[in-house]
Each structure stands twice: as structure tokens, then as C-alpha cells.
Amino acid sequence: MELIKNIFFNTDRLVANNTIKISYTGLFFQSQSTNVYIKYCFGNDWENYTESEMTKTELGFQIEIELQDKGSFSFCLKNENNEWDNNNGTNYTFKIEPPETSLTVIDNSEKSIRRVRKTYMWSKKVKLAIYKMLIYIPKLITGNYKRKSEEL
């Protein structure tokens, strides 16, 4: 998906806590720069920025970044000559959507495992009781039931 000319993301939406791949085919790629660095931050906090080198490929300079849940993602780019591509001084800024929580499974694993074990054990006991009743009640009714001591 192309959000701004020469900047592509591998997804349609930027969702928090997901990894995205950014491809840059702008001025630095077209001018055959050898190294391109991305300087980025989440929210409006440029004091806690990260700077990473992008990998040069046939499709442009690329990097994978884990998005944080801070509302927005801002970045600018520079090459080895310390020239900047910062969207004419405004930086590239994109909204980050919160993660989808309706499909999240909350697992209290210890409690659920105990419940499963208890339920499983009770179902086994009930099945065994029903089996014994089906086998031995007809024998009692017909008189074909003998105790082991009587058989000897």
C-alpha cells in the first residue's frame, strides 16, 4: 500500500503491536545512495527516537518496525551524506490504530485446566457407573448374577 509517494507499507492499516515493513523508493533510492537511515518515534515524543539503517534491495530501501500503541508513527530519512528527506520539514506521520480486542482470548490457564480435569474425571466416573448399571442390573433381575465367592 502506498500512503505517500515513494513510501510503501506491507499492510493496509497500521495497527499497534504489529510488525510492518516499510519500503522507500524516494530521492535517495533514485540517486543511488548507498546507505539510508530512518529516524522514527511513536506519538509526539522525538526525545525517545530510534535511528536504524535500512536495507537496500531491488524494491528500494526496506526495514521492519514493531509498532507501539502510542497513537501515531512519525519518521524521516537521511542518507550517508547527512541529507534529509523529511517531507518538506513536516516529517512523515501516520495514525496507528489500536489492536483489535474482540478476538482476544483471555486465558486463566490454571483455573481452566483444573476445571477441565475435574469435568473430565466426573464424566469418566459417570460413564463407568452407567456401564456397571447396564451390565449388572439385568443380571440381578434375571438371577444370573453370582458373586465370585459363590463361583468357586
Image: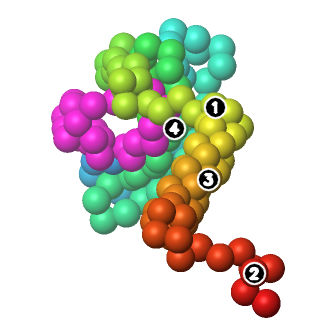
For residue 147, side relative to residue 4 (left or right): right
Label 2 to label 3, Cα distance in Å?
28 Å
Labelled disc at residue 125: 3
Q: How is the image coloured?
A: rainbow
Disc 2 versus disc 4: nearer the observer: 2
Position of 55 relative to 108 (above/below):
below
Quadrant where the N terminus is found in the figure: top left
Q: Is residue 21 visible?
A: yes
Q: Is residue 102 magenta?
A: no
| Circles 2 and 4 in contact, beta carbons < 8 Å | no
| Circles 4 and 1 in contact, beta carbons < 8 Å | no
| Circles 1 and 2 in contact, beta carbons < 8 Å | no
- Residue that carries the numbered disc 1 in the rendered image: 108
Q: Amino acid at mark 3?
A: Lys
- Residue that carries the numbered disc 2 in the rendered image: 150
Quarter of the view holding residue 6? top left
Q: Amino acid at mark 1?
A: Asn
Label 3 to label 1, Cα distance in Å?
26 Å
Labelled disc at residue 66: 4
Where disc 2 sits, the SS reads helix
For residue 57, side relative to residue 114 (left or right): left
Q: Amino acid at mark 4?
A: Glu
User: Residue 105 versus residue 100: which sits nearer the camera?
Assistant: 105
Position of 68 relative to 9 (above/below):
above
The magenta-colored residue range is 1-22
